[in-house]
Image (tube, rainbow, N blue to C red):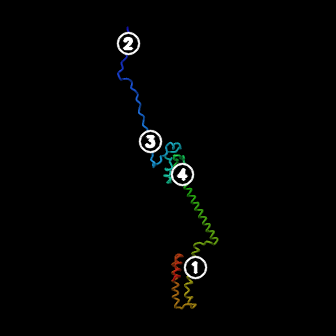
Amino acid sequence: MSKRRARAKPTAKGKGPKPKTQSPKPEAPPEVRLKPDATPPEPSPASASSSGLKAWRVVNRVQLGELMGLHPDSITDNVRLGMPVITKGGRGLESEYDAVDCLAWYRERQGKNALDKAKTKLTDVNAQRAEINLEKERGLLVSRAEVINAGQTFVKAWTAKLLTMPTRLRHIGAITREQESGVAAFVREILTEISSWKTVGDALDSSAKDSAA
């Protein structure tokens, strides 16, 4: 028997393996440029994770100033005084702060300042009291009550002297009995005017008017 040769099956025209097509490359996102007046960017999550803090606690100088109600320059001044800072900025990089730690530091410092002021005020008061007591012991200072009592005693004394003046003038023959009542009325007028004086200036004004009359 003769062997039959196997015939190769003809391939269909145009039915070969399809060439592989390359997928289009993704387009790069457009760059975003901040305007000169734009607010500084918030700290990146990478900086927060590197410091071991939550992202919301890490703030820059401007943000910390808004939280504390201070000017950004005051934040820098407080750092010089010992306020904690996570990373110090430089060459275009902003400093980063832990908002919680900085607020706690600021409250503690404000409390110390208030305590120092109170201690200073108490020291001044004690010094003034000691000075007053020393002047009293030396006789250089008297109490207000002593001055009032002395003044009232003096006024009562010369008021009594003035009221007896008309009678004494009549006894020495300076005035007649008929003139005594007129002099007494004049004395009472003087005493009434003096009682209306409230300040030293009132007394000086009254004396100046009498001198000009």
Q: In this figure, which residue is indicated by the disc labeled 4?
A: 76
Quarter of the rendering containing residue 141? bottom right
Q: Which of marks 3 and 4 is nearer the N terminus?
A: 3
Seen from the viewer's position, the closer of residues 51 and 70 is: 70
Which mark, residue 154? 1
Please indicate whether residue 23 sits to the left or right of residue 203 in the image. Answer: left
Q: Residue 21, how many percent across, how many down?
A: 40, 29
Q: In this figure, which residue is indicated by the disc labeled 2?
A: 5
Secondary structure beneath label 2? loop
Q: Earlier in the sequence, mark 3 or mark 1?
A: 3
Which amino acid type is shown beneath numbered disc 2? Arg
Mark closer to the observer (1, 4): 4
Whether pointer 4 and pointer 2 mark residues with C-beta atoms closer than 8 Å, the reply is: no
Q: Earlier in the sequence, mark 1 or mark 4?
A: 4
**Which residue appears farthest toward the top when viewing the image?**
1
Q: Earlier in the sequence, mark 4 or mark 2?
A: 2
Determine the CA span between mark 1 and mark 4: 67 Å
Whether pointer 2 and pointer 1 mark residues with C-beta atoms closer than 8 Å, the reply is: no
Determine the CA span between mark 3 and mark 1: 95 Å
Residue that appears at 53% across and 50% down: 102
Q: Earlier in the sequence, mark 2 or mark 1?
A: 2
Please indicate whether residue 212 sits to the left or right of residue 29 in the image. Answer: right
Secondary structure beneath label 4? helix
